[in-house]
């Protein structure tokens, strides 16, 4: 066992063998040996050994524990349940084995069996937790039941009765048990009863979370539309803590609900269960003013009351009745707020919510007013006035962010914008002085200046200023050198490098972000969208693996979380874990990465290192199966991960999100159908049986071609939807979601090529079933398909020609679309070759039959059917075309190597000396990345060329 713990698996196997020589039947030694075998990659031997021991139904703890570990490593949790089912039969009174059995069921989600196991445990050892494990398993059955009616009429009422029994017998001990009771009543929509539980004696147990009882009461009052109680409770909680924002929102919501219902308090008794109620605007105004007065006496400044006043103004304006209540002018209130909290980083985000209360005509005046109160000092007359300490720097930064948000920078001319960029960079470099003592992991105080300068340059780039994008990269790389942990710098660098078609620097930047856990799903798209499309195949494989490893381990990890939740009685977390797992399993990004990963593997290996058939088999792919949950796809991407200070009309909107999801789904459908069509090629494999229709139907081959034809129709439909979508000519904001590769796929002709290749498969199949005689028409059709395919592929190649990087007026311009076209070309030619090898498998037997006939008849001239010449010409032309592309790529490599970037006259005198250093780095990175892309594409094409040479019949 020690050897296994230290990772020395071979020694562990040897030691186990020694033991087994002495004691043949030592179960535990066998299992430990099996673990060693499993870890050294001998899965089958390990499994056989384990089953030997399991068949003996061991009951000693060591063997059971060891087998559990082994099955977990094999990802076969269902075998653990069998193991403990047998152990429990033999040792029926063991609390330990029963609880292991319960947990084993929990790992595989067998809720009904969990319920039974929980009750069996409770009978052996009447402890409350076991009883409630059983209750929770009922709730889980209700959650997982497809039929909502069943869960409301059977599972939940049964769970409710089980808990009520404990309540009547006064056996409720722990807080978790009360939480569970509340959860059942809430799911049954018995809100009144749930409220009574929380307010009653049982509710006193709810102590682990702050305000747990109050929050639960509030939730029930809202469900029951009991606004007087909502209001009174929110008012009471705000008196305790006037900084708790959620209760301001509830307070305002309930006040206006009560006004709309013209509610009046009863004359005699209490206003409500929770005490006094406010039901008029006057009361609300006074209440907020009192909170502000109270705040001025408090020892630390509180933001809540001031923001609540702005919120109230906004709501009153919305109702069209603000001016009567003399709450003050929002501009003045925001100014006062800035004076009080301007040196806090949160000041900007607080005010951002309320800027729409300002009339646009006041924007510049408002910004000037803020600038006037910041203590800045200029060294000389014409110099920029700089802050003297971090407080002043924060205040100034807040104003700059607001200026960007109010669109003041957007309205400037190019010259003004450049001047602002200069000023912001000057302030950035000056601000670095305040952060000299910062650790590497801390951000510099002035980082946002740099980021804002880059945003301004991005505006210029989008307006057609080519040099601006290089300056963006330069400033970001400089920023990163001073603040190596700044994720915003890295994310923006990733986006810009990808836009320029350079993937090489991106992998390193992404791994330095050290994305954890769920982030592989939320921000992984930044990497995987460009990985394979820019020709960095090795890096693409790696980035897909990152993501897939997370998705696959999520399955296993979630079961562990659920088990921990049972052990510690955190029942309300269990449904959350399950929902989390489902959300990840139906993640759009997961489906995309799975599909692209398989296409990439086929591209790199099929018919090169292994046959197409073996590759497809090892991925357990089949054309009939579709494992993507189309109806439930969840878009978990975080599209706002890049900071943006743009005004609402330029920022990413809900509409953009919807469109992006639609586009991603359409593209995924096209890719997934392409993959399934390719996976169908080996299934059409040539069968030697006589060609009568009954036979083929039995072999199931005719149904295979039907599958392929059906998939082809679906692909046509998906392509049509994609084209319709692109007609809308959607432009996402520059920091919004990146568009898919769909537009390029259609415009460069790859799409038409790939579809006609799959139609060709159908024709060849027809030739295969009909034989060579009387098939002149099919043969001619196939011949024409070959011709048009060569034309289309040649046309696709012509769209790949041109310089990838060129120097224009002293600045670099990259052409990432040419690179993407090249990558599509490689993919399309690979599909063409897979289809050709299918043609080859059909034509070869025909040819050998003809040759046999020739020998029999001893005739020198048996006419060769035209399809053979067509095929040979086609293969020869494919070979010539591929060789031409390889030569073209060699030419690109030479040009890229010869590109002397140093000689670029960086004539922009605005660049300082230290910036020039970073500009060189950036341009070098882009050049090297393109060079690598071209190399990898060239290597792959050479391998494909070798496979063409094998195709000559």
Image (spheres, rainbow, N blue to C red):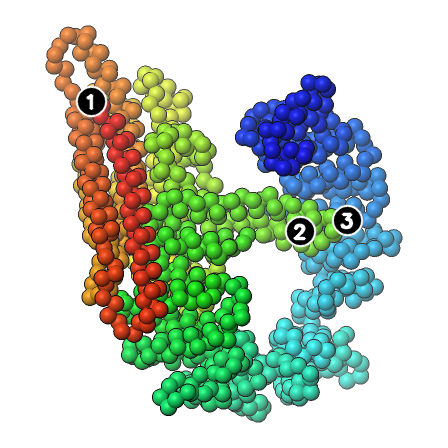
The residue carrying mark 1 is 774
> x and y percent of residue 453 in the render?
38, 73
CA gap between label 1 and label 2 equals 67 Å
Q: Secondary structure at mark 2?
A: helix
* Residue 896 in view (yes/no): yes
Tell me: 438 left or right of 817: right
| Residue depicted at x 36% and y 38% | 604
| Residue depicted at x 29% and y 49% | 931
Which mark sits nearer the N-terminus, 1 or 2? 2
In the rendered image, the residue lying farthest to the left is 861
The residue carrying mark 3 is 132
> x and y percent of residue 192 in the render?
74, 64
The 10 Å Cα crowd at callout 1, few under 14, some 14 to 19, many 20 or more, is few
Mark 3 or 1: the one toward you? 3
| Residue depicted at x 17% and y 30% | 873
Numbered marks: total: 3
Q: Secondary structure at mark 3?
A: helix
CA gap between label 2 and label 3 equals 13 Å
CA gap between label 3 and label 1 equals 76 Å
Q: Secondary structure at mark 1?
A: loop
If the image is split into quadrants, where does the C terminus sit?
top left
Q: Check if mark 3's residue and mark 1's residue have beta carbons within 8 Å.
A: no
The residue carrying mark 2 is 574
Mark 1 or 2: the one toward you? 2
| In the foreground, 431 or 504 | 431
Which mark sits nearer the N-terminus, 2 or 3? 3
Which mark sits nearer the N-terminus, 3 or 1? 3
Tell me: 683 left or right of 848: right
If the image is split into quadrants, where does the N terminus sit?
top right
> x and y percent of residue 128 in the render?
82, 49
């Amino acid at each position: 066992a020690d050897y296994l713990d230290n990772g020395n698996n071979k020694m562990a196997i040897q030691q186990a063998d020694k033991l087994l020589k002495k004691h043949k039947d030592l179960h535990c030694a066998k299992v430990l040996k099996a673990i060693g075998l499993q870890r050294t990659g001998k899965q089958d031997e390990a499994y056989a050994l384990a089953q030997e021991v399991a068949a003996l139904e061991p009951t000693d703890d060591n063997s059971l524990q060891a087998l559990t570990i082994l099955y977990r490593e094999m990802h076969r949790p269902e075998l653990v349940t069998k193991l403990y089912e047998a152990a429990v039969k033999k040792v029926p009174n063991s609390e330990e084995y029963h609880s292991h059995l319960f947990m084993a069921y929990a790992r595989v989600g067998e809720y009904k069996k969990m319920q039974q196991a929980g009750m069996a445990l409770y009978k052996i050892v009447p402890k409350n937790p076991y009883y409630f494990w059983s209750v929770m398993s009922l709730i889980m059955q209700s959650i997982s039941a497809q039929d909502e009616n069943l869960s409301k009429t059977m599972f939940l009422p049964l769970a409710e009765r089980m808990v009520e029994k404990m309540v009547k017998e006064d056996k409720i001990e722990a807080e978790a048990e009360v939480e569970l009771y509340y959860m059942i009543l809430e799911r049954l929509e018995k809100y009144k009863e749930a409220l009574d539980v929380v307010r009653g004696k049982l509710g006193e147990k709810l102590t682990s979370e702050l305000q747990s009882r109050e929050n639960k009461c509030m939730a029930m009052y809202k469900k029951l539309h009991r606004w007087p109680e909502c209001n009174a409770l929110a008012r009471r909680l705000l008196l305790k803590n006037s900084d708790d924002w959620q209760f301001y929102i509830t307070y305002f919501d309930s006040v206006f609900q009560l006004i709309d219902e013209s509610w009046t308090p009863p004359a005699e008794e209490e206003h409500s269960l929770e005490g006094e109620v406010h039901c008029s605007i006057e009361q609300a105004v006074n209440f907020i003013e009192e909170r502000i007065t109270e705040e001025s006496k408090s020892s630390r400044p509180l933001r809540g009351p001031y923001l609540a006043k702005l919120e109230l103004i906004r709501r009153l304006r919305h109702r069209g009745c603000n001016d009567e209540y003399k709450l003050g002018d929002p501009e003045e209130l925001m100014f006062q707020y800035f004076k009080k909290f301007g040196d806090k980083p949160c000041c900007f985000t607080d005010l951002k919510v309320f800027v729409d209360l300002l009339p646009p005509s006041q924007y510049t005046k408002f910004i000037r007013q803020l600038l006037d109160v910041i203590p800045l000092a200029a060294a000389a007359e014409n110099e920029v006035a700089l802050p003297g300490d971090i407080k002043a720097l924060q205040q100034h930064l807040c104003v700059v962010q607001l200026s960007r948000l109010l669109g003041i920078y957007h309205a400037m001319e190019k010259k003004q914008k450049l001047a602002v960029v200069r000023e912001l960079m000057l302030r950035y470099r000056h601000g670095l002085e305040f952060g000299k003592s910062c650790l590497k992991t801390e951000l510099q105080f002035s980082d946002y200046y740099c980021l804002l300068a880059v945003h301004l340059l991005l505006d210029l780039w989008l307006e057609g200023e080519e040099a601006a994008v290089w300056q963006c990269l330069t400033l970001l790389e400089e920023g990163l050198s001073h603040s190596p942990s700044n994720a915003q710098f890295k994310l923006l660098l990733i986006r810009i490098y990808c836009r320029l078609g350079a993937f090489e620097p991106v992998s390193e930047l992404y791994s330095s972000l050290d994305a954890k856990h769920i982030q592989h799903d939320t921000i992984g798209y930044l990497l995987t969208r460009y990985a394979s499309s820019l020709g960095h195949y090795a890096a693409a494989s790696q980035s897909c693996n990152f993501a897939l490893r997370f998705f696959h381990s999520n399955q296993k990890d979630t079961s562990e979380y659920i088990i921990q939740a049972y052990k510690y009685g955190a029942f309300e977390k269990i449904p959350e874990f399950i929902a989390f797992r489902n959300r990840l399993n139906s993640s759009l990004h997961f489906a995309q990465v799975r599909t692209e990963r398989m296409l990439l593997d086929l591209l790199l290996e099929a018919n090169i290192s292994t046959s197409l058939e073996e590759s497809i088999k090892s991925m357990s792919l089949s054309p009939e199966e579709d494992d993507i949950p189309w109806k439930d796809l969840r878009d978990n991407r975080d599209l706002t991960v890049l900071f943006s200070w743009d005004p609402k009309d330029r920022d990413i909107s809900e509409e953009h999100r919807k469109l992006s999801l639609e586009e991603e789904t359409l593209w995924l459908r096209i890719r997934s159908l392409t993959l399934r069509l390719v996976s169908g090629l080996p299934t059409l494999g040539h069968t030697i049986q006589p060609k009568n229709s009954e036979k083929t139907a039995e072999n199931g081959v005719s149904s295979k071609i039907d599958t392929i034809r059906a998939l082809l129709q679906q692909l046509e439909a998906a392509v049509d939807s994609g084209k319709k979508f692109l007609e809308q000519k959607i432009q996402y904001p520059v920091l919004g979601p990146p568009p898919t590769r769909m537009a390029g796929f259609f415009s460069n002709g790859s799409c038409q090529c790939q579809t006609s290749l799959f139609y060709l498969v159908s024709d060849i199949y027809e030739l295969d079933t009909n034989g060579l005689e009387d098939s002149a028409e099919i043969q001619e059709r196939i011949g024409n398909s070959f011709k048009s395919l060569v034309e289309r592929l040649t046309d696709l190649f012509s769209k790949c020609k041109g310089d990838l990087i060129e120097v224009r007026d002293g600045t670099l311009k990259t052409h990432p679309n040419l690179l993407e076209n090249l990558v599509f070309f490689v993919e399309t030619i690979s599909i063409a070759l897979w289809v050709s090898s299918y043609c080859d498998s059909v034509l070869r037997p025909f040819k050998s039959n003809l040759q046999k006939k020739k020998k029999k008849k001893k005739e020198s001239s048996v006419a060769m059917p035209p399809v053979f010449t067509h095929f040979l010409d086609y293969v020869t032309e494919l070979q010539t075309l591929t060789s031409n592309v390889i030569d073209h790529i060699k030419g690109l490599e030479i040009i890229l190597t010869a590109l002397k970037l140093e000689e670029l006259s960086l004539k922009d005198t605005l660049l300082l000396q230290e910036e020039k250093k970073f500009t060189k780095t950036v341009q070098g990175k882009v050049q090297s990345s393109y060079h690598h892309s071209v190399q990898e594409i060239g290597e792959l094409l050479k391998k494909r060329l070798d496979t063409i040479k094998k195709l000559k019949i």
